[in-house]
Image (cartoon, rainbow, N blue to C red):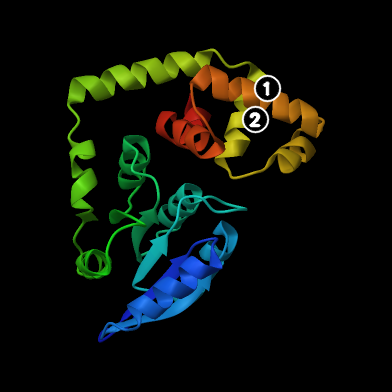
Amino acid sequence: MSIDCIEIMIADDHSLMREGLKQLLELENGINVVAQAEDGRKALREALRWEPDVVLLDINMPKMNGIEVLRRFRDLGFESKVLMLTIHDDKEYLLETMNMGADGYILKDTDANTLIKAIRTVNEGGTYVQPSIKPLLLDNRKAVEEEESEELLKIKLLTSREYEVLTLIAEGLNNRNIAERLYISEKTVKNHVSSIFKKLEVNDRIQAAIFAFKTNIKKL
């Protein structure tokens, strides 16, 4: 890691977003973009290779979503600071990523000054959450406990096969990969996924993965 210059890696599946951020950040003295990644697996490889000071990490990425990448970083003892840069201003995403060890969370529509401030703050060991979404962190303990109880009840609604599929969704596998792993058809997987979404009351795979991480499903 560099002492005089903050080394950045940008992980986002949109090339225009990556290039735009690179140009923006390198206008700032003391910041250098050393690596980019367009999917989660490459983000993991490049981060371990370059060991940047700060990783700008999107949530919605192919092959491995940003939440799974963040979890792998922490499991591996990855020392780089991780700043989530995403379109999601949802409490669920914010709380889960911060609980998993993200150092900051800002939205993609933020201004350049806020982004630079966030990068410098987390690089110096602080935590940065965009002011407009900070109120989402102000949860009381009783509400959290009630939410956890409701989530466990939802897990119990899953069949054993749906439970297996959910664990694989949490690992970042797509329907085809899940079908191959479980020796079932892709259509059957799709039906299981739809049922899981309905029972857990989630809208997409990212939310299902978050649900799995929050409830530590493999430990139940």
Q: Judging from the image, what secondary structure is the residue with disc 2 in?
A: helix
* Cβ–Cβ under 8 Å for marks 1 and 2: yes
**144 displayed left or right of 44:** left
107 above or below 160?
below
Instruction: Report the disc number at residue 36.
Output: none
At x 48% / y 64%, what residue is drawn?
11
Frontmost residue, 58 versus 47? 58
Q: Secondary structure at mark 1?
A: helix
Q: Is residue 7 visible?
A: no
Residue 81 visible in the displayed image: yes
Question: In the picture shown, does residue 66 fall above or below 158?
Answer: below
Kindly identify the amino acid type of the residue bearing the numbered disc 1. Answer: Arg
Where residue 4 sits: x, y (%)? 25, 87
Viewer-closest of 75 and 161: 161
In x, y percent, where is residue 114?
A: 22, 64
Q: CA distance from mark 1 to mark 2?
A: 6 Å
What residue is shown with label 1?
161
Name which residue lies at 20% across and 66% down.
Answer: 121
Mark 1 surroundings within 10 Å by alpha-carbon count, few (fewer than 14), some (14 through 19), many (20 or more): few
Q: Which residue lies at the image location 48% right of the left edge and 70% below the top edge?
A: 18
Depicted 19 relative to depicted 41: above or below: below
Within 10 angstroms of label 2, few (less than 14), some, or many (20 or more) residues? Answer: many
Side of 157 where 164 appears, left or right: right
Name the side, left or right, on which 36 lies relative to 124. right
Q: Which residue is mark 2?
A: 165
Which residue type does callout 2 highlight?
Val
Which percent across, then down, holds residue 134? 19, 44
**Picture quarter with the N terminus:** bottom left
| Residue beneath the point at 45% across and 36% down | 210
Above or below for 134 versus 115: above
The quarter of the picture where residue 147 lies is top left
Residue 136 in the image, given as x and y percentages of width and height: 23, 37
